[in-house]
Amino acid sequence: MALGTIGGDGRTTARVEQEIFSRGRDLKGSSFKTLMFSALGVSILVLVVLIVDVLVDGWPVLTTRLGGFISGTLRSQSTDELLGISQGLAGSLWIAIFVILLSFPIGIASAIYLEEYATQGRLTSAIDIAIRNLAGVPSVVYGLLGLFLFVTTNNGESTLFAGGITLAILVLPIVVITSAEAIRAVPSSLKQGAYGVGATKWDVIRTQVLPFAAPGIFTGTLLSLSRAIGEAAPLILVGAITDRLAPRDRSIFSPEQLDDRFTAMPIVIVGWVQEAARDVGFAAAAGAAIVVLLVVVIAMNSVAVMLRSYFEKKRG
Amino acid sequence: MADIGIESQPILPLRGISIEALASPARRARKEAAIRFIFLLAALVSIAISLLIVLSLVREASVFAFNIDWRQTWGQIGWFPRQGVYDMPTVLVSSLIVTGVAMLVAGPLGLGSAIYLSEYASRRTRGILKPVLEILAGVPSVVLGFFALFFLSPQVVERLGRNGWLVIGAVLVIAYIAIVASWMRKLIKREIDTPLSTQLVRVAALTFSVAFGLILIWWVLRVAGPSDVDNGLPFVKRGGQLAAAAVGVGILTIPLVASVSEDALASVPQELRQASAGLGARKITTTIQVVLPAAVSGIVAAFIIGVSRALGETMVVFMAGGAADAARFTDSPFEGGLTMTAAMASLATGTDNVVGEGLTFQSLYFVGFVLFVLTLGLNIIAGRFVNRVREKY
Amino acid sequence: MVRLLPSKERLSKGSRVSAEELAADVAVDAVASEQTAPTDAIIDDDMPESDLVFNVSDLSVYYGDFRAVRDVNMAIRPKEITALIGPSGCGKSTVLRSFNRMNDLIPTARVEGTLLYRGVDLYDERVDPVEVRRRIGMVFQKPNPFPKSIYDNVAYGPRVAGQKKGLDDVVESSLKKAALWDEVKDRLNESAIGMSGGQQQRLSIARAIAGDPEVLLMDEPCSALDPIATARIEELMAELKDEYTILIVTHNMQQAARVSDRTAFYSVEVDEKSDRRTGILVEYTNTEKLFSNPDDERTENYITGRFG
């Protein structure tokens, strides 16, 4: 077999083998591949080092007094038994509520308008340009907007209200863009089928578009929520206080909280990082607070990413 | 007409129809119009926000511009807002350093990750590694600030020291010279009968790149030399330095550069790769000679978006940039400094309240306005490049 | 009685036919006992306007500046199956979709001429396309079941029309009419996505008739199906003819010959200068005649396979 002649030109199998079998390793190619992989590898390694670093820094607090840390409040000494993040957690929860109540409905409704109602024209392209540019505005500029709108008109007192709305505005373009993408992916055959039996536009949106786009919209809203929870710069601008917040008698979830000065998880972390220059113990507290924040944020992102790939697979 | 053959068919009595029967019932028409109006209102919110941002920035920034003594904003010792000294070069140069160093980190790592994921990774590897990169994208910037201050600054930047900087600087300069040289060689190879205007543009570009190279060399040597900024107004020094913050910003920017580049690579039609492979090209040849040139607009867009993001990043520099409420002018990444964004954040935290104190409040908006214009311009340019990719394929 | 009216005025006015063609047509006409002009209308002058289901005159459909199809004249009688055939790009689907204003969903689409449904102009500004589509249902080329249960698919039309009671009966009778009841009666609450292609298409038919329409528009309903499933749909159409007026677009000439009472042959006219392609109605007559003894040479060429 191996010595059989192929065709009439005297080419043997062995000779063809010799010609087309790869000659050793492609050194250039494999080193390029390795280089590209190491770029990805380094990026992932950085993430691992980062997580290990905050875990190591926060470890003493997390292992010895996690419960007290979560229920504790902001204190002036890192050794204080009552030091903790309850106010930060409460503030971040309030921010999440603002985002859910404001950004989600307005963002999803904008996306529906752009994808299902808007006709080509000046208004539509103006809305489109506005949303795309808003998505690229640095977060600190949203802080300036919040400062301008709420704080200066409120005798310089910053409130949870101002911070919550500022972050809701910040993530609005993300909600619009991800929701619009999800709506665009709805097969037109479904919409046509519904129109074909006499459905109105709202019927089609309600019964076909939204159910089909729901997983994509949910993914986008989850990502934007985690972005809002991790964002600090706009809050600093609207004046979330970065150091001590006096413990209060009433419940931190009471509605009066809306008119109080507030803090949030990222702000607590920034404050403690600054305190660490004076009192090194705060670095450990900041590390522990970061672990708590990261657990929440990474959990939300992971759910969003997994949900998306699940539906991508399911729908081919 | 017998061939039509339907005259025998009886015509059955039919449902009568009038135009009213086909008209929209008033209630339904009102409901549909109302729903449409609500969605339109929601969409208009974005326009309102855009206008408000521009209005707030322009209004306060113009108050600053009309009332400030302009000598206080240029050529001063540094950024000392509470002393009424608002030296713009201080924050601009710091922003430039942080953005430049950040892109040195994010550019190669982001693009390399994108090339690996798009061209080499198997479906399964991609399915595992891409979500990891997306998790990195979700890490809040305060976490990177902590990491830059407590890990990157002592463990990486300070250990590297000035000798390490010299090595990095040398590599940088050599890489730059190599790129310019290969570009020059290509230009010289071309025919001589190119129009004069093109030649003039080439000469200008060449002069510019040589001048930039010389400045680069001067800067690397200067930073490696002894520090000369040590006198003047007092300011609170904090741990960290611009370099550590910049690397932190770069890490934050990696996933963005990677995902936009990957989109660009994915939009290159599979037929191009197959055509190249069909001609007997190796994978590396296909990638470098066919795929990357085809995706170049998108990759440029990825870098521009990365620059815009790095320019706007606040918390990492604020926490790990090494300066608290004020900064002296510095062009060294090993000094503490304030970028535009960090300057804004420190103004807002320095005292309990930003309102009042002369033009301090307005200076916030002036810097914000400059930042807004820069990032908006970059994003518009990036958008053009992205559209070019879309039009091509 | 139905008479094919040659309309000489329109022919002479129309710039679309060259003088040579006109001469040739006249020659043919002289031989034929009946004068029939290509691209011209059938007008049922003895049937009252309100008894005709559709009366189309000089219909042109545009997408932006592009005229997809022009000057269509057709009259559709009740409880018949009318087939629209022709090469791809001849605008037959475009015409079909203008019968229930599905073209409205394309932002740039525009219609000229009149399209009367029971004497009412469908493109009158007072007309709501939603009401039109509830009377004139549509079945699409690719089966497109909603990602819902079989029951919810069939009940969809009545539900959006506001019906809440008696849905069970509607679903059952619609599925029976669509010859699907026996196959699915035990799994009405299962998802429609798991059905076979032929079942899905019959479900689409059941969904279309559940809203109690008068007309069914079918846009190449069998093109995605295998021959056995196609045969079932064709059988079903013959049954549905007793109750509904059916218009079907098909690229399959045998299918048109098998199922339809009348056939309209569309073709493409290419403008030499601009290379624009516009669809035209070449010939519209009863199916038997069109396939055995067409009046127009282009029809003859197409059905004998010399063109298309």
Image (spheres, grey):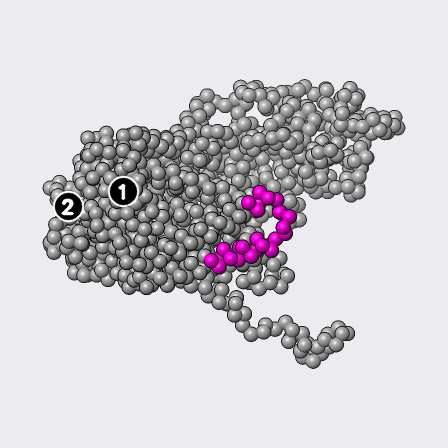
> Is B209 one of the magenta-colored residues?
no
Instruction: Between label 1 and label 2, give the one nearer the viewer.
Output: 1
Residue range corresponding to the magenta coloring: B177-200
Q: Which residue is mark 1?
A: B76
Q: Residue at x 47, y 36 (%)?
A: A115
Q: SS of the residue at dot 1?
A: loop
The crowding category of the residue bearing disc 2, from other C-alpha atoms within 10 Å (few below 14, some 14 to 19, many at least 20), is some
Q: Please state if A296 lies on the left or on the right of C222 as rendered.
A: left
Residue B140 in sight in this render: no
Nearer-the-camera pick, C135 or B49? B49
Q: Which residue is mark 2?
A: A244
C-alpha span from label 1 to label 2? 35 Å
Quarter placement of the N terminus of chain C: top right
In the picture shown, does residue B341 fall above or below B120? above
Q: Residue at x 67, y 78 (%)?
A: A14
Report the amino acid beneath label 1.
Gln
